[in-house]
């Protein structure tokens, strides 16, 4: 049962994408959209229960274990939220002219194709399939980034596709090196030597020199996709120019899928060269990301670029957590993946509504949001507070865990840098968002009522965010613990 | 065919690949870069064929054939057509002078040799010069992508980089499993397609090269 | 180091090179003409030109010193001496140690230097310009030649040209190592620069803007000019002989019989013909590069040579 689900799961969004091409009616498209996402979520929950009771399942090149399940759940929840949000957002976008009605079905089809490629990324046991699916996500999302069709979008899409393809080539090179090491260590040739589970079994016998070089290439490669600095240059452009629902998916899930790729290789490297080496590499990249993102957050005018740089920072925090390592650090990192995904998507949704209302992305134009759109403003404030790391929201919890892991690790320099940056960013984002939310509305403010469907999507995410801030439900906790075990060993 | 002959042929092909790589870096016109990368893919296909003959691995024949058809013929032809029809800029605009890029290319070659020398033991699978040449090709492709302002030359750099990875995979492990190689080639085709469409899109609306746009800042 | 080639043979080879130099130039001219769909002058035309020059009298600028008159002879002497170092019909080190490939390049560099000095000595504008341009090219060409020689020498353990040629053996392309491919590519890039042909220099024109080598010859006349022209022919065949010794397969190393000598000579002639064809093709296919683009062009050769050296050493 669970094994067939492994093949069915990528097929669901694929079929949804194909179905989108059959109709031009917007309502019909949204209905298929939501329907497909609900089916995906339902099947994933079934799979989750199967894995919770029965352990990891595998079928051919696909495999699901607790680690993959964390990312998969994040993906399907966000897909559903995005589908709900898109209903209202699209109506407004078509009315304004940002989206052309004749391209709608390609948009929906591409979004679900994008989701399908991400599902394959998470489910892949074969490292080659992982790479191919990663490249697939790049191609589909690049088209989506430039979907609005104007020059800023195309420029962002070009930079995105070039930089990430360069990066992912490095990732392929690293994969080849690991494959060579595995083949030399006697894993059976052919597809076997690319299978993560097979490699993990012989990982201690792999040649450490090759694995070291391969891992570095992989971190640079998949790190480009994940938004680790200094390979992050494409991220603010791409995430800000894309249509808002796509931005939510990009920042919420895609960069996490790339992180999953890194984690898979990290487990191999830890077994082959000892856990200190990959931890050190991730620590360095994490710190660089956090430090590099901060000044750009402070000096930002474009709200979506601000959120993009925030993603860079939070990916850095996840890398930091993985770098500190140990059960606490890894658990914190995984929890942060989930929390940040939810929160960032919420932030993008709220920002998207604000941009639609004011007709501009510039934060200096968006003023007095509380007056014209109180619910949207509240949600924006909640999301911003959460991103800044304020309790009782979810990100505070995971950041605290990462911090504890750092203290336990004794890495005082890293902790000092981390804390300083977090404080600075807290001030910065609070300044930006409060300037937007309070005060008198500018002339550009649209005064129409708030649409219900985007709000519904946003409340869904906000609820999860607050819940996770207050407590972690037992099932999730178990899942995260098992995933941590897979990584830490 | 003895193992040494195969080794020598792969080494020689590696040297020729380095030569085509130098041509790509030093190309002053887009046509020369396209022809150089086509020649490079052709050489890779030959290397695949030689390895296929030596190891009897049928997969390698398929890979060699697909490389020949796609990366040595189809993609350069598409790029050539785009340059001809769409009046994109023919001169390659470098960010740093070409002499500087050449110097960096030399540094990369030397560094690749040092790197692969330090990799030590997994040498029984690795044929001599192939690994450093592969690394050098990959890194130089990235160099070309990073230091050129012409969109099509960036794509050429991408193809060169993929060639490098292919060569390494072919020579180090006698190729990755067939389905992976095919998947990789498909990805490259799709990426090239999407990129070509973007280039033409910007070209037709504004008389600018897409890689030139730099209005997003900060 | 001493070896198989007797001194008499070496001197014979040297004279042979000098005598055949103009023939090579004539062949290249003829091939170029044919490629450009015209008849062209005969293959022996350079000989007739030399004879004509020897009959004429010398005219010297007032500003030139006595040293100027001796320049042509010195240049010719240096180039011919370089010719003695090239193995033609037989390989292996000469019986009397004469010098190695580095010495050959040094002699060619000396000839180039003396030519430039002579051009400056006459005090004319064209001479000065030609000399300065030639000296701009020289630092790019000569180190690359050195690197190519060294990359081959590292494999053989010596820089003596005869031994290097013997080391090459009878194998050709399949016997080349990876570094040899790149070294040969570098030499192909450099040949037009060293022999003063398109795309670096135009040997057919006497327009001021396109002259490098010709500019330096402008002030010479009569037998002096004849010597300089002969020196440039000899320089060309010496460079081709260098490439042949380093990269092309050789005739039988030993065997004193006439047949082996003839075979060696034939093989040498064939190699020279191949390289001459290459030069003719390049000259007919490309336009002359502007001076500031020449470093880019030579840069390709530089990178190839450096990579060849790196491949040998690493």
Image (cartoon, coloured by chain):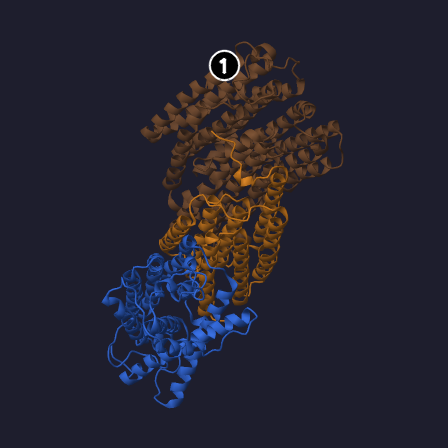
Considering the numbered disc 1 on the image, is that residue within a helix, a strand or a loop?
A: helix
Front one among A8 and C102: C102
Q: Which chain is orange?
A: B
Callout 1 crowding tier (Cα within 10 Å): few <14, some 14–19, many ≥20 = some
Q: Decide if residue B150 is in sight here.
A: yes
Give how far across and how far down residue A100 sits, in percent: 69, 30
**Which quarter of the figure is the N terminus of chain A placed in?**
top right
Q: How many marks?
A: 1
Give how far across and how far down residue A44 sits, in percent: 62, 33
Asked whether, in this view, residue A347 is left or right of residue A219, the answer is right
Give how far across and how far down residue C291 sits, in percent: 41, 55
Q: Which chain is brown?
A: A
Asked whether, in this view, residue A376 is left or right of residue C91, the answer is right
Pointer 1 residue: A434
Q: Residue at x 67, y 34 (%)?
A: A107
**Which quarter of the figure is the C terminus of chain A placed in?**
top left
Asked whether, in this view, residue B172 is left or right of residue C152, the answer is right
Front one among B202 and A476: B202
State whether residue C273 is above or below residue C141.
Answer: below
State whether residue A422 is above or below residue B113.
Answer: above
Q: Decide if residue A331 is in sight here.
A: no
Asked whether, in this view, residue A130 is left or right of residue C48, the answer is right
Q: Residue at x 54, y 31 (%)?
A: A239
Q: Colour of chain C?
A: blue
């Amino acid at each position: 049962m669970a094994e067939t689900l492994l093949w069915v799961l990528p097929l669901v969004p694929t079929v949804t994408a194909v179905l989108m091409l059959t109709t031009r009616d917007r309502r019909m498209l949204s209905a298929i959209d939501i329907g497909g996402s609900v089916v995906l979520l339902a099947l994933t929950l079934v799979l989750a229960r199967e894995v919770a009771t029965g352990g990891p399942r595998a079928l051919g090149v696909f495999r699901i274990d607790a680690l993959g399940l964390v990312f998969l759940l994040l993906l399907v929840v966000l897909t559903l939220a995005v589908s709900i949000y898109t209903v209202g957002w699209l109506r407004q976008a078509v009315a304004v002219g940002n989206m052309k009605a004749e391209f709608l079905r390609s948009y929906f089809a591409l979004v679900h194709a994008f989701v399908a490629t991400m599902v394959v990324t998470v489910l892949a046991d074969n490292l080659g399939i992982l790479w191919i699916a990663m490249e697939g996500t790049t191609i589909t999302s690049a088209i989506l980034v430039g979907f609005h069709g104007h020059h800023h979008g195309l420029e962002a899409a070009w930079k995105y596709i070039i930089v990430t393809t360069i990066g992912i080539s490095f990732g392929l090179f690293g994969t080849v090196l690991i494959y060579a090491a595995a083949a030399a260590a006697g894993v059976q040739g052919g597809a076997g030597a690319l299978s993560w589970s097979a490699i993990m079994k012989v990982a201690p016998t792999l040649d450490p020199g090759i694995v070291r070089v391969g891992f570095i290439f992989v971190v640079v490669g998949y790190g480009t996709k994940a938004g680790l600095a200094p390979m992050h240059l494409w991220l603010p452009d791409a995430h800000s120019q894309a249509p808002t629902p796509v931005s939510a998916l990009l920042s919420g899930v895609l960069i996490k899928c790339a992180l999953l790729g890194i984690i898979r290789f990290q487990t191999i490297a830890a077994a082959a060269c000892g856990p200190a080496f990959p931890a050190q590499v991730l620590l360095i990249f994490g710190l660089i990301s956090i430090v590099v993102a901060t000044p750009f957050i402070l000096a930002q005018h474009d709200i979506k670029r601000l959120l993009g740089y925030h993603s860079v920072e939070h990916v850095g925090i996840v890398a930091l957590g993985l770098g500190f390592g140990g059960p606490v650090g890894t658990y914190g990192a995984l929890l942060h993946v989930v929390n940040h995904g939810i929160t960032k998507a919420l932030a993008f949704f709220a920002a998207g509504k604000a941009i639609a209302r004011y007709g501009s992305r510039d934060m200096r134009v968006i003023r007095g949001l509380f007056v014209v759109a109180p619910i949207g403003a509240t949600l924006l404030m909640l999301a911003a507070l959460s991103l800044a790391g304020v309790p009782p929201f979810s990100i505070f919890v995971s950041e605290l865990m990462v911090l504890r892991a750092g203290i336990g690790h004794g890495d005082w320099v890293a902790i000092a840098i981390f804390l300083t940056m977090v404080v600075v960013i807290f001030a910065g984002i609070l300044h930006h968002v409060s300037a937007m939310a309070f005060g008198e509305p500018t002339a550009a403010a649209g005064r129409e009522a708030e649409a219900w469907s985007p709000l519904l999507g946003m409340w869904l995410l906000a609820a999860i965010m607050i819940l996770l801030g207050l407590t972690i439900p037992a099932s999730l906790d178990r899942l995260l613990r098992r995933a941590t075990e897979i990584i830490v060993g | 065919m003895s193992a040494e002959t195969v080794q020598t042929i792969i080494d020689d092909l590696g040297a020729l690949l380095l030569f085509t790589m130098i041509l790509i870096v030093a190309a002053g016109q887009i046509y020369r870069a396209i022809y150089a990368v086509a020649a490079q893919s052709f050489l890779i296909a030959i290397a695949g064929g030689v390895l296929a003959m030596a190891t009897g691995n049928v997969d390698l024949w398929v890979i060699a054939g697909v490389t020949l058809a796609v990366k040595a013929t189809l993609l350069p032809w598409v790029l050539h057509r785009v340059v001809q029809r769409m009046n994109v800029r023919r001169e390659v605009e470098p960010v740093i002078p070409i002499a500087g890029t050449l110097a960096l290319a030399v540094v990369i070659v030397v560094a690749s040799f040092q790197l692969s020398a330090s990799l030590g033991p997994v040498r029984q699978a690795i044929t001599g010069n192939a690994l450093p040449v592969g690394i050098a090709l990959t890194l130089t492709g990235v160099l070309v992508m990073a230091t050129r302002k012409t969109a099509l030359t960036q794509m050429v750099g991408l193809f060169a980089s993929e060639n490098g990875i292919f060569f390494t995979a072919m020579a180090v492990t006698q190729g990755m499993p067939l389905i992976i190689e095919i998947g990789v080639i498909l990805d490259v085709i799709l990426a090239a397609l999407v990129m070509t469409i973007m280039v033409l899109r910007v070209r037709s609306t504004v008389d600018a090269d897409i890689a030139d746009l730099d209005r997003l800042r900060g | 180091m001493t070896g198989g080639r007797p001194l008499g043979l070496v001197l014979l080879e040297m004279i042979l090179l000098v005598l055949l130099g103009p023939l090579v130039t004539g062949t290249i001219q003829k091939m170029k003409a044919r490629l450009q769909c015209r008849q062209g002058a005969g293959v022996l035309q350079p000989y007739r030109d030399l004879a004509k020059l020897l009959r004429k009298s010398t005219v010297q600028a007032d500003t030139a010193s006595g040293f100027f008159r001796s320049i042509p002879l010195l240049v010719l002497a240096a180039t011919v001496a370089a010719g003695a170092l090239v193995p033609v019909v037989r390989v292996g080190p000469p019986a009397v140690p004469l010098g190695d490939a580095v010495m050959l390049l040094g002699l060619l560099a000396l000839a180039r230097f003396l030519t430039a000095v002579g051009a400056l000595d006459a005090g004319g504008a064209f001479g000065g310009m030609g000399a300065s341009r030639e000296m701009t090219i020289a630092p790019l060409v000569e180190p690359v030649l050195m690197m190519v020689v060294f990359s081959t020498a590292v494999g053989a353990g010596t820089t003596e040209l005869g031994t290097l040629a013997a080391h090459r053996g009878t194998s050709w392309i399949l016997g080349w190592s990876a570094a040899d491919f790149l070294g040969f590519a570098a030499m192909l890039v450099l040949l037009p620069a060293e022999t003063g042909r398109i795309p670096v220099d135009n040997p057919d024109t006497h327009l001021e803007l396109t002259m490098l080598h010709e500019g330096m010859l402008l002030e010479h006349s009569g037998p002096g000019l004849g010597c300089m022209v002969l020196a440039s022919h000899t320089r060309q065949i010496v460079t081709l002989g260098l490439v042949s010794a380093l990269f092309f397969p050789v005739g039988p190393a030993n065997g004193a019989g006439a047949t082996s000598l003839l075979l060696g000579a034939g093989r040498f002639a064939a190699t020279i013909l191949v390289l001459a064809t290459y030069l003719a093709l390049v000259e007919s296919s490309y336009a002359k590069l502007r001076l500031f683009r020449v470093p880019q062009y030579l840069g390709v050769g530089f990178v190839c040579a450096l990579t060849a050296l790196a491949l040998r050493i690493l």
